[in-house]
Amino acid sequence: MAIMTPWAVDISNLSFRYPGNEMPSFTNLNLQVLKGERFGLFGPNGAGKTTLMNLMTGLLTSAEGSITLDGLKVGAHKNRVNKLFGFVPQDFSFYQELSPAENLEFFGAWYGLNSNQIGLKTTELLQIMGLEEVRDKPVSEFSGGMKRRVNLAIGVIHNPEILFLDEPTVGVDVQTRHAIINYLLELNKNGTTLIYTSHQLSEAEDLCNHVALMDKGQIMAHDNLDSLLKQHKQQDLEELFLNLTGKHFRDDV
Amino acid sequence: MFKLWATMVKDVRVLLRDKVGILLMFIMPVLLVIVVTSIQNSTFQLMNKNKLVLLVSNQDKEELSNQLIQAIDSVGMFRVQQLTHGADAAAVNAKLHNKEAELAIIIPADFSVKVNSRAQASANKALKSFGLDGDSVRHDTGASNPISLYYNPVLQEQLRLSVQGALRSALQLVESRQTLRDLYLSINDKPLPAKLEREMLSSKTEINQMPVSRNGNRLIPNATQHNVPAWTIFAMFFIVMSLGGSVVREKVSGSFIRLKTMPTNYLVALLSKQITYLAVTMIQALVIFAIGVWLFPFMNLPALNIPHATGALILVTLCTGWCAVSYAICIGVFAKTQEQANGFGAVSIVILAAIGGLMVPSYVVSGPMKTLVSFSPLHWCIEAYYDLFLEGGKLSDALANIIPLVAITLLLQLVTIVGLKRKNLI
């Protein structure tokens, strides 16, 4: 049973440790994201961003603490929760042998859309992503930027309330990045909550209105971006990031 | 239902774009069936068209060795080629090394003398036992030097034993005839009339070959009837190369991460793969059977006779396909890489085919291997097919093999589900 809640994401007392690891990834982590926010989650390599993203999307499960999406507990209401959100992983998550239209047709069905809805959304998304002319070509023949757009289109085909984005613009040219960021802002205007993680901090400033900085499994800072910069007396997000997490290398091994 | 349909459409599209996979699933098995049936057909025809060349070096100058050569020739298994007198072991060896023949015999110089002597001794013994006086001067001069059989080591033991049996029967004929002639001469003081000799020595009892058949059909089994079902099963199970790899590819690719975050159970994907690839196995069987029926006669191979029990044939083919698909998915779920799936899949199918009776008939297997046979799903598949293709059985006859096959399939499905649960994939 869903309850009325202002939170798109509500993480409460979450602890998690990978099997075989002595050190926990998180201990009693708390984090809330309001509905309609453009939330950025940042941190150096190994900070725990991807693990947290995987826990929020149900790819990993934790026995301690809870995560709810729009009031529904992740893990307990798998089908309902999974309908709520879209996921754009960093890796290309589609069938390279298929065309963008065929990928959208398949993933749309898996999101529970009927063939009419899929047809309409496919036409709309391919137009927005500038892929109409290659709609029937195998994605394997596409450039990295085109593949990124296919990856994003699949994640939003079912009009999700929450959209998880893991480095959605990595390795793309300026034009593609611009197009993707604009589309995400448009989605957010229509009510979709964005949960975004990236190492592109300048891009994050364009996209996010709320940020959390993570390191070693802990939230170091979490607030409105402007407030955070003022609070820590920093000019931009990159300075704030280095100030809070240090300048030494963080090799994630 | 729409999800399942969309997934099947996706699977078919992915499959159709995998040209190498299609090649492995269709062209290779068809080639395999044609090549193996052609080779096996040559073995089946060993007794008529494709006789074994037998070189004969006759070092004996007397008549009995010629009679032996005639007797060997009349066995029907050999094309006898006589070497010039005096060709010794070295010369025979050289000819075999030169691949002029696979077999050769050397008849020793004292062959006729010794056979004669033994025949007369036997005749004397027989006369004495009848209470008549035998010629006491004649004694058995002992065994002659043996006839040496030279053979190419590539010749299989089974064939070598058949050759030895054929030679022994020719030898027996010559020795018996000589004994009979001596006996007749001693009693009647005149030679045995040729007509009587033929009458006494020729076998009166024919051997009528009757392949057991449940529907009364007495078609003599041929290489096609044996091989087409066997290699069809092999082809169906060989989809492990495509399907097992496809499951692993999906599992390790990014698409699987997305699938796991979607409001649809991964079992839908597995069900779709089962239906899609089951259809593939049905098409494989259809193509191979069609080749057996229509193409083989144009290749001078016996045509495949499709069993009359069509319903049973469809059911056996469906169960075989389902088991093959279940096996491939099970491999795909447990393999971590495509190389693991392909390597283990291919080798395990060859092993299961070998112990299941596809390569060597399972009735020749003995000891602990006999127990192992039952664990090969391919064994139950081939037995069910043979019930229909060779024995003219009906559905009720094939059921005894279908039931264990379905049991193995269900076990594979269970193991797959346990594997998916343990890996947190469903």
Image: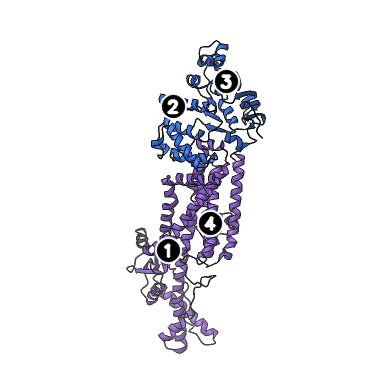
Chain on which label 2 sits: A
The reply to whether dot 2 and dot 4 touch (C-beta < 8 Å) is no
Rendered colour, chain A = blue
Q: CA distance from mark 3 to mark 4?
A: 57 Å
Do pointers 2 and 4 mark residues of a single chain? no
Q: Chain of mark 1?
A: B
Chain of the residue on which disc 4 is drawn = B
Q: Which residue is mark 3?
A: A212
The answer to whether residue A22 is above or below residue B124 is: above
Q: Which residue is mark 4?
A: B318
Task: Please state the horizontal and vertical placement of residue B185, each as a whole percent of the image.
Answer: 44, 86
Residue B406's quadrant in the figure?
bottom right
Q: Nearer the viewer, mark 3 or mark 4?
A: 3
Residue count near mark 4 (Cα–Cα under 10 Å), binned few <14, some 14–19, many ≥20: some
Placement of A109 over or under B319, stated as above or below = above
Q: Which residue is mark 2?
A: A179
Tag 2's secondary structure?
helix
- Marks 2 and 3 in Cβ contact (< 8 Å): no
Distance from disc 3 to disc 1, alpha carbons, whole Å, reads: 71 Å
Q: Distance of mark 4 from mark 1, alpha carbons?
A: 20 Å
Left or right relative to A170: residue B84:
left
